[in-house]
Image (tube, grey):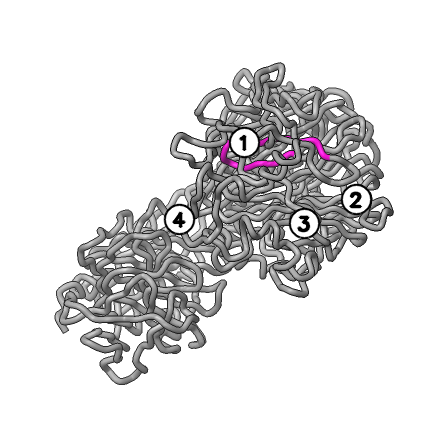
Amino acid sequence: MKRKSVSMLAALMLFASVAGQGFGQDAAGAASSRGNEGKTESQGGTKPVFANVSVHDPSIVKDGDTYYVFGSHIEAAKSKDLQNWTRFTNGYTTPRNTLYGDLSKNLAESFAWAGENDSDSKGGFSVWAPEVFWNNDYVNADGTKGAYMIYYCTSSTYIRSAIGYAVSQNIEGPYKDVGTLVYSGFTRDDAKDKDSQVNKKWTNTNIRKLIEGGTLSGANDRWFNPDGSYANGTYPNAIDPNLFRDKDGKLWMSYGSWSGGIFVLQVDEKTGKVIYPGKDGKTADGRLIDRYFGTKIAGGFGKSGEGPYVIYDKETGYYYLYVTYGWLGADGGYNMRVFRSKNPDGPYLDAGGQNAVLPADTDNAPYGNKLMGNYLFQRDVGDPGTGIGVGYVSSGHNSVLIDEKTGKRFLVFHTRFPNMGEAHELRVHQIFMNGEGWPVVAPYRYTGETLQKVDRQELIGEYKFINHGKETSPAIQKARYIQLDKNNTISGDVTGTWKKTAHNEAELTIGGKVYSGVFVSEWDPVSERRVMTFTASSHEGEAVWGSKLEEQTDKQIVQSVYQDLNLGDTTKVVSDLVLPAEGTRHTAITWESSDPTVVSAKGEIRRPEEGFAVTAELTATITRGKEKQTKRFEVTVLPYVKAKLQARYGFDGNLAEESGRFEAGTVSGDRIDKAGGSITFADGKNGQAARFDGKSGIRLPKGLIASNTYSVSLWVKPEALTAYTPTFFGAKDSEHWVSLVPRGPVKDNTMVWSGSASWYDGPAGMTVPAGDWTHLAFSVDLGTLTVYVNGVQKFKGANFPDVFSGGDAVFSLGVNWWDAPFKGLIDDLRIYDGALTPAQAGELPNLKS
């Protein structure tokens, strides 16, 4: 939870700056299976054009002919077509904030409880996940009716939060705050969180006034654990408000995150205030009704489940509750689920009849229809296009729009992407209703298409197939190959039967499970053509997708693999080659080497310790059915060249660079760009070492590294192992950096971690101990990263980003721009021009001067 409110705040703020750049290659589209038959609107094959933005936790609303999304950290954008978006906000700027004017003054009431540079939101305002809509019934201060309303939340910890609301006559703001509605995280007695001056006692919320005014009979003892802390296993975290109208036009607010679950309260349409139940109780099916928080409709027991979004669909007669499970980071398996109910306050059930409110402290993965998880329609060798394919990771915190003009349904969410770290963008996919009234999501991004009648013959053929399963996992589901055969069987990597019902409805039976959905033509951004797809869901709540491949003979497929097979630049090889064993549609690729002492048939290379380059030939044999071709690659392997010492900081009582080629280091505060701080010296591994107090760092001179062939070596003795804390750090800017961390994001490994166009992890497979000296070194050799611990190679990988070429990077020890500073000792920092040879790396831990 703490990681969400600290590290991800930094990440969200950082990547908001990429708005409009568009770094994710993907696409999608479609509509409702009921009453939306007609010609495809963009079926001519013209390549769609997109303008992308980064809006986290997006909530969508249509105003006139313009679509708006509002998200966390005061980001918002607009579009006329759901494809080309323009950001119009200015983040946390104050006092001239686009949405809130004088932000600090306007939201002062909510900020007095949570947010604005408090506790876990130190360094930021922490305004999250709003909802904006037009309310005809709202009575303004001057007696006129109608206003745009924004319901927002502020948060300081994983449970201390508040929901407030503000109004405007302009959808783009500025909005004037009206008041704070729901508080969470309060305690029975006086208490304060770390790095906070806020007294969390319940009497400092609006509850005291509600009791004094007779709305509540008193405080609920069950809000508190025996020690007086907030009972967050039962009661909600007051964030993520979602406003919706029921079939009779009454207004409701769902809200909540993690903690004790998702709750719902009715809202007074004229005032915008929530209507508190006033007394405790239970629903007819046994769910909690709390006098203050309302009726529980999902989750509980601190299990993941956040970003609730409820919408009434008059066509099906159901209220649909969307929630997101998992952790929102790229490694967290964030995934969207859906339940439905005949009543706005539940019970909400999944396709298997399971209640969205958890029955016990148990895994929530089996509950809810899963709409999508981490996936990749990978581009295999021989497939058209470029890149790795199209896919998402950690997609979630969605909203839904049913367009009154077109009848189309849209799923609007943020997503991260395979191999791209925490960078995120907004995405819109169309939703369809299957024959049983359950939402199924288009596999590809919306490009204006509409469902139409499909001919059975055009459905027959080979598909890439994704089964999203039910798990919450960081694993990426890669596509498999299946065939929809003429006799209505499914063959290939999975087997079963299929059929088309009605004009475009799909029914697939796989492994004894029946999946119901639709067939629809969509734009595939990799092959850059319209393809037939299917999307369907089972009674178990599993979603499956298919994307049809172009019809080709075995000869054509082998030729495509032959033309696409590429090992990159093989004229100056310094690391193992990746030799694909398979091409598209399971086309076999086998390898032979003319000289295994240079490069093996598995791609393993042996570099000469010194002297001259050596060469060998690799031969690939490509086979599918009776078709076969061979392709040859000449490989030149370069010898090792000893790295040359460029700079050394011995820290023997000072921060001087001993060769005199570079300036001395300077002391910084707890961030790379902050003044202050204090560095002292203590007994080190070789002489003295620099002592870091967890509040300070060392700024090193620019130009220390200025190429893509370099090495870094140092001794570390951490006093504490905190996540993401750097020892050595270098950066061209806040989006292009390299960090050597004792405890990194991959299973707490010691690792070299880099952020650039795509993030890179170089884990050592272990974690250095606290309280002991460990020697760490890493080399970068034209994109090959090698990591050493105590002179032993622990990681080697290709495609490491070139961050430092050009010579304008900044460098530091112990600090970066975001994470907790290093606490402990660092000694004998050495910077080399060139990559360390294995022999050099093995000798470094034994060097004494």
Give the distance between the C-alpha atoms of the residues marked 2 and 4, in whole angstroms: 57 Å
Asked if the magenta segment contains residue 257, the reply would be yes
Give the distance between the C-alpha atoms of the residues marked 3 and 4, in whole angstroms: 45 Å
Q: What residue sits right under mark 4 in the picture?
A: 579
Q: Residues within 10 Å of mark 1 (few under 14, many from 20)?
A: some
Q: Residue at x 58, y 38 (%)?
A: 208
Q: Residue at x 33, y 52 (%)?
A: 722
Look at the numbered discs 3 and 1 and tell me whether their residues touch, using CB distance below 8 Å: no
Q: What residue sits right under mark 2 in the picture?
A: 134
Q: Does residue 297 appear in this view?
A: no
Nearest to the eye among marks 2 and 3: give it.
Answer: 2
Q: For the magenta stretch, what is the residue range?
A: 254-267
**Type of the residue with mark 3:** Phe
Nearest to the eye among marks 2 and 4: give it.
Answer: 2
Dot placed on the residue nearer the N-terminal end, 2 or 3: 3
**Type of the residue with mark 2:** Trp
Q: Which secondary structure lies at badge 4?
A: loop
Q: Which secondary structure lies at badge 2?
A: strand
Q: Which mark is residue 219?
A: 1
Q: Residues within 10 Å of mark 4 (few under 14, many from 20)?
A: some
Q: What residue sits right under mark 3 in the picture?
A: 70
Quadrant including the C terminus: bottom left
Look at the numbered discs 2 and 1 and tell me whether their residues touch, using CB distance below 8 Å: no
**Type of the residue with mark 1:** Ala
- Please determine whether, in this image, residue 124 is positioned above or below residue 678: above
